[in-house]
Amino acid sequence: MVNILAAIRSKWPFLKKMAFSQKKGIRWIGAAAALILILTFGVLPLVDSGKKMKQEIFIKKKTLEKYEKFRQSRKTIEEELNQALRQYERTQQKLLAGETPQLGAANLQEIVKRLSEKNGIGVRSFRILEPKDTNSYRKISIHIDFNPVNSLMNLSQFINDIEHHEKELMISEMDLLVMNPRMPNSVQGSLVISGVMKNTQAKEKAGKKQ
C-alpha cells in the first residue's frame, strides 16, 4: 500500500504539495481554535472579572463616601443639639424657682432681702406686682421701699448685685429722693425689681389646643 502511494506521488508531484498544504491548513485551523479557546475560557473571563471588580470598587467607594458624609452630618447635628441643650440649661438656671407666680415672687423677694442685708440697705416694705406673661415665660416684679441710705456706694453695690445676679434680674423702675440737699449721700426711695420664671400655664394651654 505504501509503495502504491509512493508511486502515485512520484507520478503526480502536485499531490505531494497538496498534502503538505492540507497539513499546514490543519495546523492553522488548530492554532485558531486554540486561540479561540484561550480567549473564551482565559482572557475574556479575566476581562469580565476585572470589569466587575472595578464596578464593585466604585460602588464600595461611593458607599463609603455616603457613610462618611452621614457620619460628619450626624456629628454636626449632635454638636448643635448638645450646644442647644447647654444653652437651654443655662437659661433654666437663670429663671426664678417655682411653678406659680406666688412662689416665683417669694423666691425673688428672698433674693432681694439677702442682697439688701448684704449691702446694708434697710427695706421698709415689699409689694408684689401683677405678673406679665410673655410666650413661654412670665415676668415677676416686686416693688420695694427702702429707708434712707447714708452711703451711695452701698446703694450702688446693691443695684449692681441685682443686675449681675445669677438669676435673670433687672431693675424696671427707680425712684430716688435726696432728703437733705446738704447731705446728698443720704438717699431713700423705691425700686421695682423684676425676674423671669417659666410660664407653665402657657404650656398647658398649648397642650390643650393640640
Image (tube, rainbow, N blue to C red):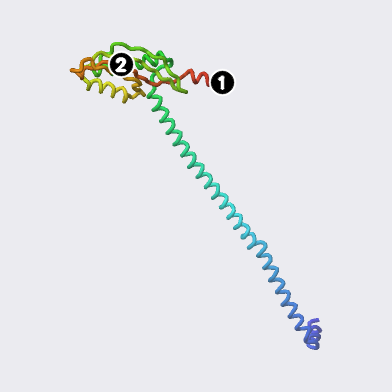
Precedes in sequence: disc 1 or disc 2 = 2
Residue 146: image x %, image y %? 28, 14
Amino acid type shown at disc 1:
Lys
Q: Residue furthest front?
A: 181
Which residue is at 40% across, 26% downward?
A: 91
Q: Residue furthest bottom?
A: 11
Residue 158: image x %, image y %? 27, 21
Left or right position of 162 against 73: left
Q: Is residue 8 above or below residue 148?
A: below
Q: Which residue is mark 1?
A: 209
In this rendered view, identify the residue nearer to me: 92 or 145: 145
Which residue is at 34% across, 15% downward?
A: 143
In this rendered view, identify the residue nearer to me: 168 or 159: 159
Amino acid type shown at disc 2:
Ser
Q: Is residue 35 above or below residue 151?
A: below
Please state, as top left, top right, bottom left or bottom right, where the C terminus lies in the image. Answer: top right
Q: Residue furthest left?
A: 182
Q: Which residue is mark 2?
A: 190
Left or right position of 153 against 170: left
